[in-house]
Amino acid sequence: MIIGGGPAGLAAAMWQSHCSPPPRLLVLEAGARPGGWVRSERRDGYLCEHGPQAIRSTPQFSQIVAKLGLEDELVAASPEASTRWLGRRGKLRAVPTKPLAMLGTGLLSLSGKFRLLREGRVPMQRALDGGESVAAFCERRFGRETVPLVQAMLGGIFAGDASRLEVASAMPSLTQLEAEHGSVMRGMRAKRQAKRARGESGGSQPEIYSFEDGIEGLVNRLAEVVGDALEVDAPVESVSQDGVGWTAHLRDGTQRRASRLVLACPARVSARLLKHAAPELAVELAAIPFASLASVYLGLPIAKPPAKLSGFGFLLENEPGTPVLGAIYASQLFPGHAPAGHQLIRVMMGGSLHPNVVDCEDRDLIDTAVATLQRYVGQKISPTFRHIVRCREAIPQYELGHKQRMQRITDLLSSSPGLRLCGNSYEGIAVTAQLGRDAGLRAAHEGSAEVAAR
Ligand SMILES: Cc1cc2nc3c(=O)[nH]c(=O)nc-3n(C[C@H](O)[C@H](O)[C@H](O)COP(=O)(O)OP(=O)(O)OC[C@H]3O[C@@H](n4cnc5c(N)ncnc54)[C@H](O)[C@@H]3O)c2cc1C
């Protein structure tokens, strides 16, 4: 039995259904539709993504697309939308795709550039008790001037605070490169060379995709495969355990029983469900914080956007009084996301550094989005379409101590037989991290049947 029909719960169920022999499955989803934060809403000809705008291709993503037979529905992001901008004090600058190309930009001062070049000579540091923040790691390895840049980047991924996010959990590739090569830059170079030696493209731009009808196409197909095993409008209030298995107690007073239970809902919900069945585990899960954010969608009657409104979008360095994290030029990435002759811009605001912004009035959110765009693009913006989506407690924050907390959670799980956790609260924030066969089977059916080759 899986509680939560978001990408993680659906993918776990799908991989399970390919086990031999297939187990009897049940997925309980609180909402009227499955998919969690993945939702693609068409309004007035614009396609507004509530959650992920695009999916970065990874081996897990390719694996599930092939398994679901969705190859023909994939839509690749337009190669013309590759420029990413960084906003600082009212000005947008193009972000280079390789770290050393930073040396040719105005993003760092001369001394900042020399400091960046010395990264290879910075000694490694022994792991700190309680972890090291992303900000502290970047300052130590790349120099202080890189911290605001990394903060902007983390705003776009975690809507989080670089001085609170733990580097080993939020950006594990950085600590791995440091551990394996003694330097992040040396490690990146070695990886690129190894890729070239394998004959793979050394392209520095990741492949980015959506589907014909938006990202929801992926979860709809997953739900289709899960079929009758999915029960929607089935919010679970608590779970209990006896010697035989687990019972889910639903809000409508009914119960469902199973020998194994996978909690694929956010950690803060799992904490509530486990309050009586596993109180110590519940305390650890409740301690994982979540950030809220709002997306403002603006439709502009512009056929050919000006240079600063062209590309992937921008991220903003944190500036007092500006709650905007950045903007995605949605219809440049995927031209079908706006009517012909129009542009769709998604402005994101809030996050850990501006926790109350999500509760602002619609009018204030729209005014802030328009004013910020005008300031950075340098011209008047007159949207003819406006829409707002608020995502409350949406993005888990892997803050300092997360790695140690994960170890305690793993230890505590061993005393709750038949219980598993999955989803983006734990070890991978991106939607792709929830989709792979490994994650799905580890969550749902550990140590059991082989996956049938079908
Ligand atoms: C605004 C935003 C932008 C994002 N952008 C990107 C991006 O560009 N790229 C990317 O890779 N990822 C992005 N993400 C992250 C991505 O959406 C998540 O990785 C993904 O949704 C996590 O899936 P999940 O199944 O773990 O959790 P969720 O999507 O949170 O799904 C959990 C499910 O559990 C259900 N549930 C909760 N409580 C109960 C209950 N009591 N009983 C039964 N069911 C319950 C919920 O209704 C929900 O359907 C973004 C997220 C947000 C919010």
Image: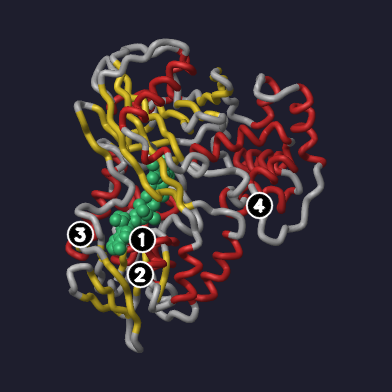
In the image, residue 244 sits, relative to residue 196, either above or below, namely below
Q: Are marks 2 and 1 in contact (CB under 8 Å)?
A: yes
Q: Secondary structure at mark 4?
A: helix
- Answer with mark 2 or mark 4, whichever residue precedes in sequence: 4
- Front-lying residue, 267 or 263: 267
Indicate the quadrant where residue 243 lies.
Answer: bottom left
The type of residue carrying mark 4 is: Gln
Q: Which residue is mark 3?
A: 232
The type of residue carrying mark 1 is: Cys
In the image, residue 116 sits, relative to residue 436, either above or below, namely above
Q: Residue 219, percent across and down?
A: 28, 49
Q: Quadrant of the N terminus?
A: bottom left
Q: Is mark 1 within 8 Å of ligand 1?
A: yes
Q: Neighbour class for label 3 at 10 Å: few (<14), some, many (≥20)?
A: some
Q: Secondary structure at mark 2?
A: helix
Report, in whole angstroms, how far the alpha carbon at label 2 lies from the one at label 3.
18 Å
Q: Which residue is mark 2?
A: 273
- Front-lying residue, 409 or 307: 409
